[in-house]
Image (spheres, rainbow, N blue to C red):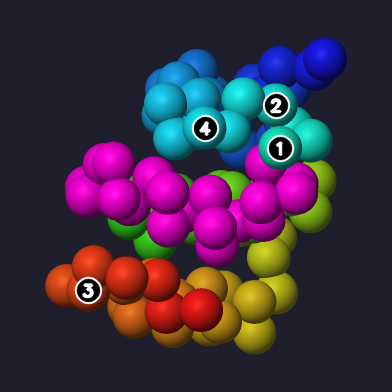
Amino acid sequence: MRDLTSMKNIGTEMARKLAAAGIRSPEELAEAGAKEAFFRLKTRYPGVCLVHLYALEGAVRDVDFNALPPETKADLKEFSDALKGKGGSPR
């Protein structure tokens, strides 16, 4: 099984946080998707921010998070904004 840090945008700290949120492999991250993974992180670590969500989406797509299309970034920002101050998932 590959390590999360083998994915783009995922460093040691992000991998540690993802594991604490129940995501321990690239396959589990791909299956959960960036939004679900971010929701789990946000529940455990309220300080995670939009850049973390971009990084997760980039990891799932195997691209640097700066290379995400503007429309994808806008969608992810909307998702992140919907989580602020709410206890539930905006799905």
The prevailing secondary structure element of the residues shown in magenta is: helix
Name the residue type under label 2. Answer: Ser
- What residue is shown at x 79% (from left), y 53% (from top)? 61
Residue marked by disc 1: 28
Name the residue type under label 1. Answer: Glu
Say if the magenta span includes residue 40. yes
- Asked if the residue under mark 4 is in contact with the one under mark 1, i.e. CB atoms within 8 Å, the reply is yes
Question: How much space separates mark 1 and mark 2, taking CA atoms?
Answer: 5 Å
Question: How much space separates mark 2 and mark 3, taking CA atoms?
Answer: 28 Å
First of labels 3, 1 by sequence position = 1
Residue 35 % position (x, y): 55, 62
- Asked if the residue under mark 2 is in contact with the one under mark 4, i.e. CB atoms within 8 Å, the reply is no
Residue marked by disc 3: 86
Residue 81 % position (x, y): 32, 78
Question: How much space separates mark 4 and mark 2, taking CA atoms?
Answer: 9 Å
- For the image, the number of numbered tags is 4
